[in-house]
Image (cartoon, grey):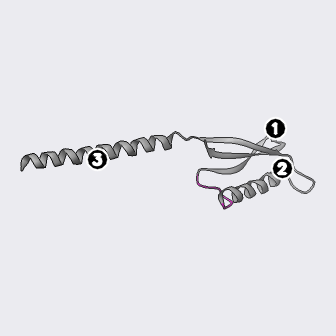
Amino acid sequence: MTKRIAKASVGILMAVVSATGILTAGAGTASAATLQNTLEGSYYGTQWLTPYMECHNEEIDRNKRTYGNEAGGGNEYFYCAVGDRGLAYNLWWRHYV
């Protein structure tokens, strides 16, 4: 009886270790992706729109098309930031690579 319990315990332990190894390997693969910011364009404004409004409109449009909402998808999204000595706004894409 003791030998059966010992064998069963070893079997369970090996199954747990194997499952943990698989989960760890999967987590390691997922963590290999890193966030990157990619410049998508610069906006200097138009006769009717300021540089910020032009960039902001594109930001909203790209987030809606890519992620289905204006805010983006969690850690991934499009956003505007001041660029070119304050004369323009740059559209950036924060995404996993």
Q: Is 5 a magenta residue?
A: no
| In this rendering, position of residue 8 left or right of residue 89 | left
Against 45, residue 25 (above or below) is above
Residue placed under numbered mark 3 in the picture: 16
* Along the viewing direction, whichever of 44 and 94 lies nearer the viewer: 94
What is the x, y in percent for residue 65? 71, 58
Residue placed under numbered mark 2 in the picture: 51
Instruction: Work out which residue is located at the far left of the displayed protein and give it.
Output: 1
Q: Amino acid at mark 1?
A: Arg
Secondary structure of the residue carrying tag 1 is helix
Which residue lies at the image location 78% right of the left edge and 57% below the top edge?
A: 57
Residue placed under numbered mark 1 in the picture: 85
Which residue lies at the image location 67% right of the left edge and 61% below the top edge?
A: 69
Mark 3 / mark 1, whichever is N-terminal:
3
The CA distance from mark 3 to mark 1 is 58 Å
**First to last magenta residue range:** 68-74
Which residue lies at the image location 78% right of the left edge and 54% below the top edge?
A: 58
| In this rendering, position of residue 60 left or right of residue 44 | left
Could you tell me if the residues under marks 3 and 1 are in contact, i.e. CB atoms within 8 Å?
A: no
Quadrant of residue 3 in the image?
A: top left
Picture quarter with the C terminus? top right
Secondary structure of the residue carrying tag 2 is helix
Mark 3 / mark 2, whichever is N-terminal:
3
Front position among marks 3 and 2: 3
* Along the viewing direction, whichever of 94 and 12 lies nearer the viewer: 12
The CA distance from mark 3 to mark 2 is 57 Å
Against 82, residue 59 (above or below) is below
